[in-house]
Image (spheres, rainbow, N blue to C red):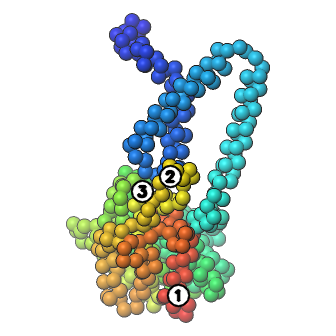
Amino acid sequence: MAGPAAWINRRILSNRVAVFVGLISYPLYLWHWPILSFARIIRGEDLSRGVRIAAVCLSFLLAWATWRFVESPIRFGRKIWIKTAALTLMSVIIAGVGYTIHYRDGFVSRFKNVPGDVGWLQPEIPSSKDCLKVLGTDQMRFCRMAGKGPPDVVLIGDSHAGSLYSGLASAYSRHSLVLMNLGEAGCVPFYDTESYTLGRQRTDCRPLVNRMLDFAASSPSIRTIILSARGPLNMTGQYFGEDPLGPKVISWNGAEKNSDQADVFAAALKNTVSRLSATGKNVVLFIDWPELNFNPRSCLPRPVALFSHVRQLCGVPRSEVETRNRAYREVIFTMKKEFSGLRVFDPFPYLCDATACYAERDGRLLYQDDNHLSAEGSAYLGEKFLAEQSLLSP
């Protein structure tokens, strides 16, 4: 079936259209990706069908022009030294420009606040050796302290707590208090609880989280324990908008048989709050902030204004946020009534109005992606947290 006399070769692959595509296939391969990438840079993340079709057609046109006026003359034209010299010079220039863009992490100066907002100016340090040594482990995504001396406050949770850390640490340090952050990405900060995404490699959350909570409960210097985690996802198992990874599952040792995930979440949280409250320390639940169903960078102005398409509402309608968070928030506020000493911080009043919940404030991005706070968002909520909770003299 593959020989030169085979019907598929004589009738299909020898067709002029197929031969033409074969001739331009390499420049077509080179052109199509940057064209589609720049279309997204100019238009934003979501490209209409018409824009995608136009991009593919332009790829074919430029591929033909490249084959006709660049590839063919270089390969089959006169062999003169100037070709080699020109190609070498162009390669050096392209390499230099590429390295400059890579070294500077793009031309972020186009956006005045973005480097600071999303944390590019101060790269995150997930864990420090000194902190890990204190806990007696070498496997923990977040283990860090802001300041010297024993910690006064500990923030425990998943990557949401990790994105909150920089703002809280800065706020506490201005009051001469040391904040410690302990956490593991994807692990809810509940005793004896496993959490994982179906179809992905599992992190053994239970022993790690138990170690964090036991350390917080037994450390004499720690007076306040803050719990922060991605709430609606862990309670429902479902993402907000597209499902990039698969369902999220949590399991707790003390759950009743045949409990659904929402009941497991509520019971495991209640058990943890009960055990931590019994230590006499201040326990604070930092309610999860609203998730987005878009990339917040789509709110930024795009280059080539004539063709740009900037998101009109840099946020999510309040009705959608309420629907997504209703059951989760009911669990939190029911818990607050049950435990008289439990403190709760609600970020919704600072991120939402009656119409929507927003991803930016005064031109500053509050999110770095569709669910994690940016450095600006962390600093903003960190200040609101300390002002509202009056935790400076527990």
Q: Earlier in the sequence, mark 2 or mark 3?
A: 3
Most extreme residue toward the left, as rendered? 258
Q: Earlier in the sequence, mark 3 or mark 1?
A: 3
Nearer the observer, disc 2 or disc 3? 2
Q: Which numbered tag is attached to residue 202?
A: 3
Q: Give yes or no for contact between labels 1 and 2 (Cβ–Cβ under 8 Å).
A: no
Left or right: 182, with 83 as reference point = left
Left or right: 107, with 277 as reference point = right
* Residue located at (24% from left, 71% from top): 256
Left or right: 266, with 312 as reference point = left
Residue 337 lies, in percent from the top left, at 32, 88
Position of residue 67 relative to residue 113, above or below, is above
Q: Earlier in the sequence, mark 1 or mark 2?
A: 2
Find numbered disc 2 in the image and state the secondary structure of the residue it sits on: loop
Nearer the observer, disc 3 or disc 1? 1
- What whole-number distance in Å separates the C-alpha atoms at marks 3 and 1? 38 Å
What amino acid type should be assigned to the residue bearing mark 1?
A: Ala
What amino acid type should be assigned to the residue bearing mark 2?
A: Ser
Position of residue 321 relative to residue 226, above or below, is above
State the image quarter where residue 198 is shown.
Answer: bottom left
Residue 334 appearing in the image: yes
Q: Which numbered tag is attached to residue 387?
A: 1
Left or right: 10, with 377 as reference point = left
* Residue located at (40% from left, 42% from top): 50
Q: Which numbered tag is attached to residue 308?
A: 2
Residue 183 lies, in percent from the top left, at 50, 69
